[in-house]
Image (cartoon, helix red, strand yellow):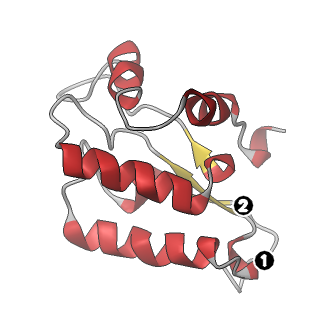
Amino acid sequence: MPAAPDVTVQVAHFGGAGPGYEDPPSREAMAVMAAAVARHDPHTRNLYFDVASIVDRDRRPELAKLVADTIRQVGTDKVLYGTDSAQGGNLRPRESWAAFRKLPLTEAEFARIAGNVPPYFR
């Protein structure tokens, strides 16, 4: 980020690979980025995170809480909702949104995320 201060960077899948959020090293990397955002590190000004395919049908309650807590840590204004390709084991868009809506977030948080537009689309 220091080498590209004016470039928007979108971290796909909350730093993981999906579907699901079961990869500890990916979660550790996301935790480092989330901590930097939370402490208002100026290098994170143009850093955004998408949640494509990290919430699936079989999400465990502790992972749902981790995802919700991390969303709050980075701020809902930096979270972009998306789905992955609707093929193979990935959820279809309607199913993906329904699974995402089961996270322990407030209606205001869901509304904010749903309304976010990436800067490169503005």
* Disc on res. 5: 1
Residue 116 position, x and y percent, is 69, 36
Q: Amino acid at mark 1?
A: Pro
Q: Quadrant of residue 118?
A: top right
Identify which residue is drawn at 39% across, 13% down.
Answer: 94
Between residues 38 and 93, which one lies in front from this camera angle? 38
Q: Residue furthest bottom?
A: 2
Residue 87 position, x and y percent, is 26, 24
The N terminus - image quarter: bottom right
Give the vertical position of 73 relative to 114 (above or below). Answer: below
Element on which disc 2 rests: loop
Q: Is residue 21 left or right of residue 50?
A: left
Cα distance in 3D space between marks 2 and 1: 8 Å
Mark 1 Cα within 10 Å, few/some/many (few <14, many 20+)? some
Identify which residue is drawn at 20% across, 28% down.
Answer: 57
Residue where numbered disc 2 is placed: 8
Mark 2 Cα within 10 Å, few/some/many (few <14, many 20+)? some
Q: Amino acid at mark 2?
A: Thr
Q: Quadrant of residue 80?
A: top right
Between residues 80 and 62, which one lies in front from this camera angle? 62
Give the vertical position of 120 relative to 10 (above or below). Answer: above
